[in-house]
Image: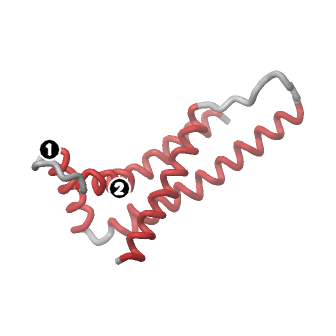
Amino acid sequence: MNSVKRIIAMAEVVLIFPAALFISALAVRGWRLPQSDPTGTAHQIVKWYTVRSWTFPVLLVRLPCVVLVTGCAALLWIWYDGRASRKTAPQADDPPRVNASTLVIAATTLTAGYILAVIAMQTLIN
């Protein structure tokens, strides 16, 4: 089960990276720094995304949706599996352990939800 969680965690990081890069570039581009390197790079990233018409539906909507659905399913699976294992071997003194893969899955799922909310709000505003 650990290797499956690692694979899911790595896949979610790869799938959420383009949308997270765009949202981060939007935030950095909004800074009012005097023509600094991060602001110029962020402007180039945003320009790259806006010039191509396929980036919005694919990189900013579909991939975060896939991460959100996959992450929720994986977290439910991890939670259900943890409950089943605690029922078979109850130990009151031993707290439940959360490994790094589970934390990455939870973080990418929350990030995907945040990105989809930002995109939805921005679409409704415009």
Q: Is residue 30 left or right of residue 37?
A: right
Q: Percent from the top left, x then y, of residue 15?
A: 44, 52
| Residue occupying the point 65% across, 32% down | 98
Q: Which mark is residue 23?
A: 2
Most extreme residue toward the left, as rendered? 35
Q: Could you tell me which quadrant the C terminus lies in?
A: bottom left
Q: Is residue 50 left or right of residue 60?
A: left
Image coloring type: secondary structure
Q: Percent from the top left, x then y, of residue 64?
A: 47, 59
Query: Is residue 16 or residue 6 the one in the foreground?
Result: 16
Residue holding disc 1: 37
| Residue occupying the point 16% across, 48% down | 33
Question: In this figure, what is the number of numbered marks?
Answer: 2
Q: Secondary structure at mark 2?
A: helix
Q: Quadrant of residue 52?
A: bottom left
Above or below 124: residue 50: above
Q: Which mark is residue 79?
A: none
The type of residue carrying mark 2 is: Ile
Most extreme residue toward the top, as rendered? 93
| Residue occupying the point 52% across, 55% down | 67
